[in-house]
Image (cartoon, coloured by chain):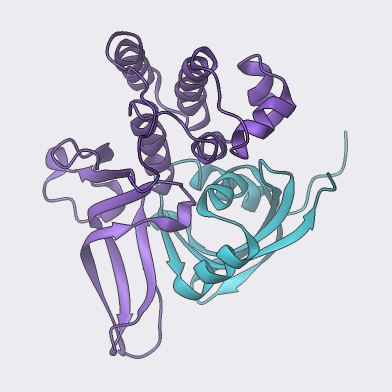
Chain colours: A cyan, B purple
Amino acid sequence: MGAPKKFEIETECINQLMSGAYGLTVRVSVAQEMRLAGIDLTDVQYVGSTGRVVRSGMLGNRGLWVVRGETTEGVTIELTVAVISSDYDVELLEVQSVTKRGR
Amino acid sequence: MIHQQGNAFHSCVVEHFNAEDFGAPFKIILKDCVSVTEDDDGNMISYHIPDPEGLLRTVVFARVLNPRKLSGADIKFLRKAVGVKQKVLAKAIEVDPATLSRCENGMQPLGPASEKLLRIFLVQTGIKFHKLKECEAKTKLEEVLSELFDVLKPSPVHSADDDLELYFVRESSSTAGNDNSDSDGDWEADKATGTR
């Protein structure tokens, strides 16, 4: 049996949350950064529901998580989200492209 | 909702919201269900979409049932919306991955038989990816397959300027009095406004 993965509970939580009916808040500044990086909300949705949490903290009363995952196009991205899981509420704070698969 | 210090921001639900950040090659117009936060000068700071996962599924079904021939950009968007990689889709609809890549890049049209198979695959995968409940999925699948086989006749686009707009609303009649905006119903294609 391998060592337990870090942030397993947070990962399970965000994957479940973003696979169901939650509310998403997107700041206009983040939307602009996304467009420049060639990332859209289908990528955010996919990575949020399949990626894993790699960093965790708090932002006020909200969980502040960085979720890393690969899009359907083979690009690894990181989402920084602030979450109140009991309210099914996710705010997208930052989206970054980490690597791009060579073609 | 956005959490800002001070009171320089205010929120309101907008009548029509163009959900362009989903990256669709057609317009996704959301009616009376997106809350926008603006500063005192009227500049939009953020927007709040209820149930984006359910919205994506509804958009996929609406586009699949729209008779307009799928463009390369449509195929790529719909594939991403149901969370499928290009190679997987190519195998599922029995086309060469290079051919599908050319189709998605607009260098080659997808044949009518492959397009029909693609539409069916998108419905089936959309149901699985978006984890529809069994009874809901069965009803949806029956409705969509029936429409695909009996009603839908894909038609080519005649003018490049002829934009496709699909309208969506939140159906909330069954939960009147519920003040949680994220659980007030389901996304539905707006049949009253339809397609433009």
Look at 56% across and 53% down and name the residue there: A44
Q: Position of residue B102 (x, y in %)?
A: 67, 33
Above or below, A9 relative to B195: below
Quadrant for the C terminus of chain B in the image: top left
Give the side of residue B53 with respect to residue A5, left or right: left
Q: Is residue B152 left or right of residue B83?
A: left
Q: Is residue B5 left or right of residue B122?
A: left
Nearest the eye: A82 or B140: B140
Give the camera-side residue of B61 and B127.
Answer: B61
* Relative horizontal placement of residue A63, taking residue B41 as reference (left or right): right
Residue B84 appears in the picture as rendered: no
Q: Position of residue B177 (x, y in %)?
A: 12, 51
- Residue furthest to the right: A2
- Whether residue B24 is visible: yes
Q: Position of residue B118 (x, y in %)?
A: 52, 21
Quarter of the image with the N terminus of chain B is bottom left
Residue B115 position in % (x across, y down): 50, 20
Q: Residue at x 63, y 17 (%)?
A: B92
Residue at 62% in and 58% down:
A38
Residue shown at the point (50%, 75%) measured from the top left: A29
Height in image: B93 above or below B170?
above
Task: Farthest residue to the front: give it.
Answer: B159
Count of picture labels: 0
Is A84 rendered above or below residue A12? below
